[in-house]
Amino acid sequence: MKQKKYAKMLYPSPIGTLSLVADEQYLYGIWVQDQTHFERGLGDETIEEVDGHPVLEQVISYLDTYFEGSVQDLSDLPLAPIGTDFEKRVWTYLHAIPYGQTVTYGQIAQDLQVASAQAIGGAVGRNPWSILVPCHRVLGSGNRLTGYASGVEKKAWLLQHEGAAFQENKK
């Protein structure tokens, strides 16, 4: 069996260097360097750093626009068909949260008729497409800033960048 090959490009962003990984047809992930679940699911497959790649260039164009403060529709971007059925349901929901708006884990659980907000939190945390599938727009109860795989301060930066309302955690 032929070993799968992935292409990787690094993207310097305001929240740190992002690792973008794709194969010939799908985007497999956008991770902040050294975050939890970094490049999860790629195993020890061959990942080659490249200078150009059709899928990754599309993602870079989106990220450029996003960090400039604009939004563009990326519904045609081919996300890899990975994750459990449950994770896919949650990620599809996340994908639909509009720029500058937030929802709570409890709200997602209610909308998807899932008994556990914790189960939702687990699936949100395993989302491999940072920023693109906006898991940073999910807040805890009372719109409090909670968990983010690459660190809560990065989540706060993204929400502020989008002008979204949230409650800072009081130390």
Image (spheres, rainbow, N blue to C red):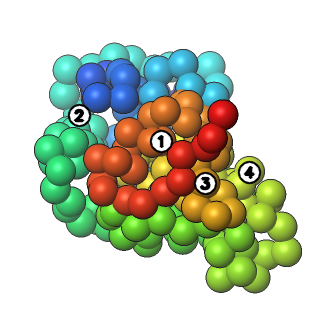
User: Who comes first in sequence, dot 2 or dot 3?
Assistant: 2
Find the distance from the CA under tag 3 to the CA under tag 4.
17 Å
Q: Which residue is the site of mark 3?
A: 144
Instruction: Please say if 23 is above or below 106.
Output: above
Q: Earlier in the sequence, mark 3 or mark 4?
A: 4
Q: Which residue is mark 2?
A: 53
Q: x, y percentage for residue 134?
A: 45, 55
**Three-letter amino acid code at disc 4?**
Gly
Tell us which disc is closer to us: 4 or 2.
4
- In primary-sequence order, the first of circles 4 and 1 is 4
Q: Position of residue 157 (x, y in %)?
A: 38, 39
For the question of whether residue 92 can be seen, the reply is: yes
On-image quarter of the N terminus: top right
Task: Give the residue type at disc 1.
Answer: Lys
Residue ID for mark 4: 122
Identify the residue at horizontal 64%, vertical 72% (top origin): 108
Total of numbered circles in the picture? Answer: 4
**On the picture, is 54 further left or further right than 133?**
left
Task: Say what secondary structure mark 4 lies in.
Answer: helix
Query: Mark 3–mark 4 contact, CB under 8 Å?
Result: no
**First-in-chain label (3 vs 1):** 3
Q: Is residue 30 left or right of residue 170?
A: left
Amino acid type of the residue tagged 2 in the rendering: His
Identify the residue position indicated by label 1 in the image. Answer: 155
Q: Residue at x 39, y 18 (%)?
A: 48
Q: Where residue 73 is drawn, which disc sits there?
A: none
Sort mark 4 into few (<14), some (14-19) or many (20+) by Cα contacts within 10 Å: few
Whole-number angstrom distance, CA of label 2 to CA of label 1:
28 Å
